[in-house]
Amino acid sequence: MSSPRRANRGPAAAAENRVALLAAAKATFVEHGLDAPLNQIARAAGVGQGSLYRHFPTREAIILAVFDENLGQLEAMVAKVDSTLDELLAEMFDQIVDVAVLFELFRFADSSDPRLAEIIGRLYALLDEKLGDDSSRGSIRRGVTAEDIFLSVGMLAGLLNKTPEQERPSVAKKCRALLLRALCD
């Protein structure tokens, strides 16, 4: 999975290196877990360890950055005026199939870490926005909270981390159906 190291282009390559590091981190964490050696991520991205540590000084920083990137995709989807809670949940479940390992983040990060609190706050805000609008809420009953949904997704991530990779999509589909039955009117 290692890539040939690219020629050092200095600061001009910083944005490109960051993108490569995030893609490599996501793939490496999915394949080897959050305990994967960070030098493995740097090699997979085709950069030196110095570049990795300039962008992400700690393991938590790169894990949070991957989580943040996925959250950015959810935010872009919710920004569409006609998006619905069903679409948001479907996208969350699709992401969790690919990166359930990211929920192991809670094992690494201090629960009082402001970076973690900010990411969770952003996710809650997305869910609250859709839960608070009757036209985008769909059939999710009143009284369901962002915390309820976050807890459900976290439970699914824990299950998926123990499920063979080839079975994850079908398990996630069944869990989504169960979740929706539990949360709907």
Image: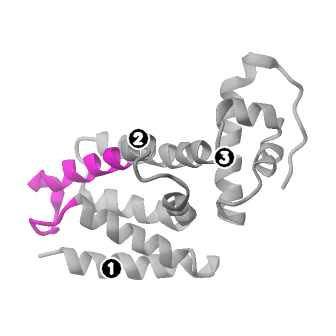
* Placement of 12 over or under 157, stated as above or below: above
- Locate residue 82 relative to residue 116 in the image: left or right: left
Q: Are marks 3 and 2 in contact (CB under 8 Å)?
A: no
Q: Secondary structure at mark 2?
A: helix
Q: Secondary structure at mark 1?
A: helix
- Alpha carbon of mark 3 to alpha carbon of mark 1: how far? 30 Å
Q: How far from the left and from the top, in percent, is residue 132?
A: 13, 52
From the viewer's perspective, is residue 144 above or below residue 108?
A: below
Rounded to the nearest whole Å, what is the CA distance between mark 3 and mark 2? 24 Å
Mark on residue 23? Answer: 3
Q: Is most of the magenta stretch helix, strand or loop?
A: helix
* Numbered mark located on residue 177 in the image: 1
Query: Which mark is in front, 2 or 1?
Result: 2
Q: Mark 3 or mark 1: name the one nearer the start of the chain.
A: 3
Earlier sequence position, callout 3 versus callout 2: 3
Give the residues drawn in magenta, as a range. 120-145
Residue where numbered disc 2 is placed:
114
Q: Is residue 173 left or right of residue 14?
A: left
Q: Give the colouring mode of the picture.
A: one colour
Residue at the image position 40 percent from the left and 45 percent from the top: 119
Which amino acid type corresponds to the residue marked 2 in the rendered image?
A: Pro
* Quadrant in the picture for the N terminus: bottom right
